[in-house]
Image (spheres, grey):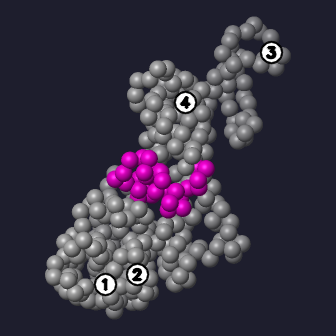
Amino acid sequence: MRPYWLALCQSCGQALLLESAQEFDDRDPDDLPARPATVLWPQDGRPIAAEVPPVVRRELTAARAGVRSGSPASAVLHVRRLLEAVCADHGVTGRTLFHALRELRRGGLIEGWLLSWAEELRELGNEAAHLGPRPLGKSEAEDAVELAEAFVDYVYVISGKYHRFRVRRGTDKSSNIRNVVQETPAIRILRKSQVAFRVHPYPHDPARTKSRAAVADELGISPMRLLKAVILYLGEHAVVAIAPVEGVIDERALARAFGATRARVAALADVVRIGETFAADVVSPLALPYLPSVLEESSAAASSVFVSSGRHGLELELDPADLIRLTRARTAPIVR
C-alpha cells in the first residue's frame, strides 16, 4: 500500500496531505524511512492573497497547474505572463516586457533586486517560448513559480503591510494612499512639494480600460473637474495642454497661448517617447514639469481638480493653484 501523511510545511505552516511515491507493507507509517511524496492537498499550493488582482491571480494559478501537470514550459510561460499582468495592473502598457519592467523600477514600484528576479524570469519565459538545445526541467519550473509567488507577495502584500505599519507609527503621513506600491512619480512630486492632495482609487480592469469621462462617472464627480493632459507640438517643441476631459482642445487657441501660429497633437509614439513615467493613455501633467504647460482658464476657478496619477486606478485631487505652481502652467481659454 501507499502510506498517506498529514504534515505541516516548515516554511509557511500550511497543512499538507501527502501520498508516498512508493508502496510499502503494512508497517506503521511512522516507522518508515523518508521517501519521495506527492502533495495531494492543497492542490494549488498556499492560498493566493486577497490583495492580488484577478488578472495576476489567474496567471499564477495557471503556472502552478503547469508544474502539477508536468508541463514545465507551460508553467514558465504563465510566469512570464504574470509579469506582464503585474505591469498592466500598474498602468505600464504598450511596451515590451523588458522596457515595462524597467518602467516599474523607475517608478519606484519595485526595487533593483526585484528587477533582477523579474529579468531572470522573463528570460526563462523567452526560452520556454522557443525551441532550444534542451527542454526546461521540472525543477526550473518549480523555482520559477516560487520566485513568481515571492514577487507577487512583495508587490501586492508586503509593501502594503510596511506602509500600514509606517502609518500606524506616524512615520508615513500619506495615510490616504492604500499602499506604497501605488506611489507614482506624480505622487512623489506632490509629497515632496508638501501640498495638500488626496488619492482617489477606482476599479481598473486591464482588459477594459476606461475613458477619462468614464473615470469621472466612476468617481461621482463632474467631468469639468476631471482634467486630461494632452501633449501637442508647436513646430518641433512639445507642450502640455491641461483641460476638462470632455473639452475639445482648440489647437489655434493653444498656439496663441504660447505666441505660436500652429499646434498639432502628438502621435502616440511621441507620447511614449516623451513620457517614461506614465502609461500613454493616462498622462499625468505633474510628471511633465519640464514641458511648458497651459491650463484651461475655467478650470483655474474650480474648488479642486482631479488629474491622473500616471497609472490606471488612481486619480489625484488638488487645488488648481497648486497644479499651476507645480506644472508652471499659464492659463488661457484653450477649449472649444
- Give the prevailing secondary structure in the magenta stretch: helix
Amino acid of disc 3: Leu
Question: Does residue 108 show up magenta in the picture?
Answer: yes
Which label sits in the foreground, 3 or 2?
2
Which label sits in the foreground, 4 or 3?
4
- Assess disc 1: are there few (<14), some (14-19) or many (≥20) residues with their C-alpha within 10 Å of its C-alpha: many
Name the residue tied to disc 4: 141
Which label sits in the foreground, 1 or 4?
1
- SS of the residue under disc 3: loop
The mark nearer the N terminus, 1 or 3, is 3
Question: Hey, which quadrant is residue 169 in on the image?
Answer: bottom right
- Assess disc 4: are there few (<14), some (14-19) or many (≥20) residues with their C-alpha within 10 Å of its C-alpha: many
- Assess disc 2: are there few (<14), some (14-19) or many (≥20) residues with their C-alpha within 10 Å of its C-alpha: many
Judge from the rendering whether residue 117 lies leftward or rightward of residue 289; answer left or right.
Answer: right
The label on residue 327 is 2
Name the residue tied to disc 3: 32
> Which of 246 and 16 lies nearest the eye of the viewer?
246
The mark nearer the N terminus, 1 or 4, is 4
Tell me the CA gap for discs 3 and 2: 72 Å
Q: Quadrant of the N terminus?
A: top right
Tell me the CA gap for discs 2 and 1: 9 Å
